[in-house]
Amino acid sequence: MGLMDGKKGLIVGIANERSYAYFIAESLLREGAQCLFTHLPGEKMERRVRKACESLGAEDPWLRPLDASSDEQLDAVFDAVKSDVGELDFIVHSIAFADKDWLKEGLFLSTPREVFTQACDISAYTFAAMADRAAPLMSEGGSMIAISYYGAEKAAPGYNVMGVAKSALESTTRYLASDLGPKNIRCNAISGGPFRTMSAMAVGGFGQIMDVVAERAPMRRNVEGREVGDAAVFLLSDLSTGVTGQVLYVDCGFSSIVM
């Protein structure tokens, strides 16, 4: 038996085989979960995400287009979930966006208003928007997680407005936990270490961050995708029924040291 046998949920954020959401899906599927997926609109993105899902063994996956900045598309996805599977036990929010032109060292001071607000909207508000739509589908309770990064707590080279957005995401997680706790719905975040995803590569100081973590983290290496995936299983399974409103660091211990 798997830890997620009989549980079904929605995973938002698989871009390819190198995204955290991919490894989370891999761990969930291994433990028996039924996973539903979304992709950014467009045939190219659908093909890419479908290929990633099929590589996980999810043949003919439930897959719907979603631009999370659109309330209409969010409504359409969750209406389809309700129609097709009825209820949910978990959701995984693993999306973030900021204009890469402003993810360079020394540019945060001049971040335009529209870049700032867009980053917070897509990276943080969308978790609340998804939670609002998912909660009515969790009549027996459930679990929700979002993916953050240490740049929410400390300034990281080139992370800039994305760090502000991740701070908002972590705060959003705590307020969701407070609102949804009486419904037996838990909300947590995983702060994963730096990982070579497509979005991470857009950060100007990313290579420097990876090098510093590998040198100074207690485990003297960077985190692996499967480690974040397995931590997600813990937070989404019944092993963590007393855990909510928390940020779980899965970063080889880097966040626990001063230097």
Image (cartoon, rainbow, N blue to C red):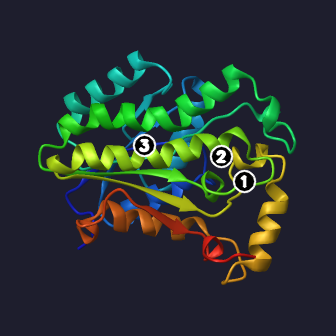
Quote the CA–CA distance across marks 1 and 3. 19 Å
Label 1 sits on a secondary structure element that is loop
Identity of the residue drawn at 69% across and 38% down: 161
As drawn, 37 above or below 23: above
Earlier sequence position, callout 1 versus callout 3? 1
**Residue 216: x %, y % from top left:** 76, 78
Q: Is residue 79 left or right of residue 229?
A: left
Residue under circle 1? 155
Earlier sequence position, callout 1 versus callout 2? 1
Identity of the residue drawn at 38% across and 25% down: 74
Q: Is residue 121 left or right of residue 77?
A: right
Q: Is residue 181 left or right of residue 96?
A: left
Q: Are marks 1 and 2 in contact (CB under 8 Å)?
A: yes
Kind of residue indicated by mark 1: Ala
Q: Is residue 93 left or right of residue 134?
A: right
Kind of residue indicated by mark 3: Thr
As drawn, 16 above or below 231: above
Label 2 sits on a secondary structure element that is helix
Residue 208 shows in this picture = yes
**Residue 69: x %, y % from top left:** 50, 23
